[in-house]
Image (cartoon, rainbow, N blue to C red):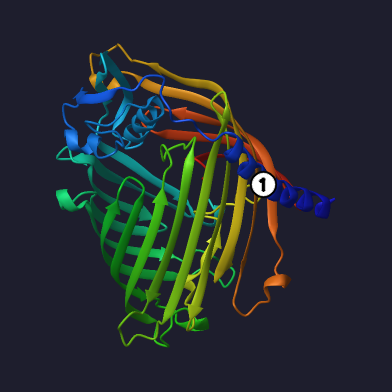
Amino acid sequence: MNNIVGRMGRWFFHAAGALTCLAAFVLAEDNRSAKSLSIRSIRIEGNETTQPQVILREMALHKGDTLSEISLDRDRNRIYGLRLFNNVTATHQDDGDSTDVLISVVERWYIFPFPVFGIKYNDFGKLYYGLGISHQNFRGRDEKISAAVTFGYDQSYSVSYQNPRLIEDEDIFFRVGLSYQHVHSLNVVSDEYDQINSSGSISLGKRYGLYQSLVGTASFDRWYVPDTSQGRTATAYGDDKFWSFGVRYSYDSRNMREYPTEGTLVAAEVRNQGFGSESNVHTFAYSADVRHYTPVGGGSLFAWRTYGTFMAGGVVPPYQHVFLGYRNRLRGYFRERFEGENIVGGAAELRVQLISPHYFSIDLFDIRQLRSLRFALYGGLFTDVGKAWFRSSNFGDVPWRAGSGVGLHFLLPYSLILRAECALNDNGAAEAFVDIGVSF
């Protein structure tokens, strides 16, 4: 029974990829418009805080271009994908062979306090909790500032600032972050133990057109482990200090990040940990992530993803291990963690639109941030597969893990996604769970 379920899950995953390629060919879009209209002007309204260039930056259409309804709808989705607005509408007023485009937005609240809460090792006696605050549209320029503090079983402090367009004419991206963590190891296979990490990073990158970007990141880390047994750090005395440098390339044509319904993401990153230092840490991490979303009619879509992270170089300390779990969960093994130096995985999902996006307002108070709140509902049929292994292991000797199931996806106001799902794994075990955010 276990082997049959596993084979079925893997067969479904591979078949899904082939069907996606076929659907992408069959559903190729026709971008012609019935009438050739030149865009005379683009006007924006409703942006009391957000600066116009933040919105115009996401648009493929510009003054003087020929209007395309498909392109205009894509621009509307991309503007909504900024997660700065409750609603975005895009209309046009024709005048002979010319047309005026109107982008109307309903702004959100941008300053949020948020709770931090978690349970380590699925043990309710090991809680961590805290509070953070973020500004998602500082100066009306889509700049983001956040700070958070946590207490309890794990303790941490962090602050970050991000500017998507530090240099206006060059489209230069900038981010800086500082953090301190006194936490316990992610995996308790070798007993839990304290880890103290201080980190600082700075990123600088450039966006090329609407879809491509290249970002370089330099960071400094110190990992201190009071208990130095079992090689928990690269140094014998439990105190690793090292510089890292990484480069990430991405092509991202998804129409929105909170819940994509069409487009492609291709991302690749290489990171040298121990760059230019005399530390005992000398490792390389190579990562890739490919996701594709194909509309299949009626607001529904077919999506698939494949990803991997691979380590090379010297000894990999436990704090650099990678996991199936945490950020890359396997549904069917939702509460389990598979640890290694390398991971590879994939997923396929049919998402059926049950309730198309509807908008409602809370009229109890005359507050514009509570107007035009978005709600939608999707049903999902999915399969996940993956494995994690150490370099000392033979890839073929490590079993694949797979799970398949169904779920409901609630698309709530302010980009909150709530998923209620159940899955059956390749060992025949069933589980039900609730998670926040889109699966991929």
Q: Residue 138 versus residue 27: which sits nearer the camera?
A: 27
Above or below residue 122? Residue 399 is below
Q: Label 1: how many residues lie within 10 Å, few (<14), some (14-19) or many (20+)?
A: few
SS of the residue at dot 1? helix
Name the residue furthest top: 363
> What's the residue at 57%, 33% (across, down)?
27
Q: Is residue 179 left or right of residue 354?
A: left
The image position of residue 265, as x and y in percent, is 46, 49
Number of disc labels:
1
Q: Residue 157 versus residue 145: which sits nearer the camera?
A: 145
Q: Is residue 326 left or right of residue 42?
A: right
Q: Is residue 176 left or right of residue 341?
A: left
> What's the residue at 73%, 48% (across, down)?
9
Name the residue furthest right: 1
Above or below residue 386? Residue 384 is above
Q: Residue 379 versus residue 119: which sits nearer the camera?
A: 379
Q: Residue 171 versus residue 128: which sits nearer the camera?
A: 171
Disc 1 residue type (three-letter): Ala
The image position of residue 358, as x and y in percent, is 44, 18
The image position of residue 379, as x and y in percent, is 60, 30
One can see residue 86 in this view? yes
One can see residue 337 in this view? no
Q: Which residue is mark 1?
A: 18
The image position of residue 53, as x and y in percent, is 18, 37
